[in-house]
Structure formats: structure tokens, C-alpha cells
Image: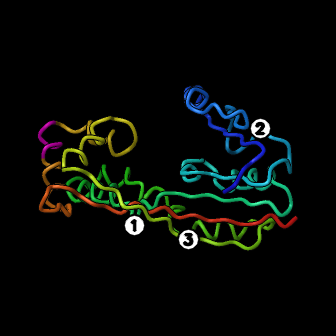
Amino acid sequence: MASPHAVLGIDSSERYIQFAHKQIKDPRVTFRVGDAQEVPVESASYDAAVSGLVLNFVPQPSQALKEMIRAVYVGGTVTAYVWDYAGQMQLMRYFWNTAVELDRTTAFTLDEGQRFPICQPEPLRRLFQIAAQLEKVEIRSIDVVTTFRNFEDYWSPFLGGQGPAPSYAVSLSEEKRVALREHIRLTLPISSDGSIQLMARAWSVRGVRKD
């Protein structure tokens, strides 16, 4: 198991940074408000730089990657992982596949599977391979089975209003939201005991700074 000397977490949200400070008390860990496209660290100051489930949200992913490379030593590791929105992030795919079927004009433009091509293995690999300072680029999947107790356990997060799918769900009229809910219910693999098991896949990519 890794035992780092120091870990720095960066996020653009002051509220997230405050929350992280409250949750993690390890003296080796610090947090700082910052922009992924202009990382507030000295060059070649870390052994590794990691982007966790965020690279697809950055306006210029290639610039964020350049900053991650700049932050690590020669021989250091640069890595990222993103949800497989277009494929085996099944929690989202069952939602958006049904939403697009019922409302293609609006739902299609919000679907992360359409909006984030970088969340597929080959575009993610290419992003790292075209970075001249990286070598030994590798990509692999990370698969986790997510279990929901019943349909309401699956559906309730979509009523929170945060994120593209929940925001879309709560924007619908009650009639259309009920129609969406019931259409999704018919497509899900619901077990005889009412539980639902879905795959949550992320794609991870890593490279080593060579100069």
C-alpha cells in the first residue's frame, strides 16, 4: 500500500474544499482551491498527478493534461479515470436511453454519453498518446457492481436536481416524469426480490513523464 509523504487535493469549488477539510484530518493531506487548467503547484514537484472523474468536465482536457505532466517529476505517473457514460455506466444509460426515446430533442443534447466522447477508451488513450512528454500509456476498465434495494432506491437520486440527469428529471411536468419513471422501470433488470444490480464502469489511463 502506498504511504505518501504528502497529498494535495485541488478543486475549483470553495465549498468542496471546505467539506474536504472537515472530512480528512491526516496531516499529510492538504486542499487548495484551483483550476485544473492552471494547477497551482511548482513544476516537477510531485511523484504522481491524478484526475478523478473530472477530466471530461474540464473545458480544455489537453491543457489540464499538460498541467498534470508539468506537476510531476521525470519518471512520475500521470493518470485519470472517467465514467463510461456511453457504455457500462448502467445507472445512467438506462435513464438516458429511455429519456432519449421519449424526448429525443432535449434529452439527447444532455446525455453525457453524447457530450463526453473522452469518456470512451480510444479517445482517452489518444489524448494521452499525443502528449509528447508521456510514454508507456496504458488504459483499462474499472468495473464495480452497484446494487439497489428496489426501484425507488434506484430512482430517488434522479429527484435531487443536481447534475444533468436529475436536473432533466425535475424539469419535466409531473405527467412526463411519471412516464419516464415507468418506462425506465420496464427496462431495468429487476430481480424477483425487487433488487437491481447494475454495472458501473470507469476507464482509467496512465502514462509516465519521459522528459
Point out the frontmost of discs 1 and 3: 3
What residue appears at the point 76 percent right and 66 percent down from the top-left corner? Answer: 208
Amino acid carrying mark 2 in the image: Pro
Q: Earlier in the sequence, mark 1 or mark 3?
A: 1
Q: Mark 3 points at which residue?
A: 140
Q: Tell whether position 177 is magenta.
A: yes
Dividing the picture into quadrants, the one containing residue 143 is: bottom left
| Secondary structure mainly formed by the magenta segment | helix
Q: Quadrant of the N terminus?
A: bottom right
Vertical order, 4 against 74 (above or below): above
Secondary-structure class at tag 3: strand
In this rendering, position of residue 92 left or right of residue 48: left
Secondary-structure class at tag 1: loop
Amino acid carrying mark 3 in the image: Arg
What residue appears at the point 41 percent right and 64 percent down from the top-left corner? Answer: 86
Segment colored magenta: 174-178
Q: Tell whether position 211 is magenta.
A: no
Q: Residue 75 carries which label?
A: none
Q: Which mark is residue 40?
A: 2
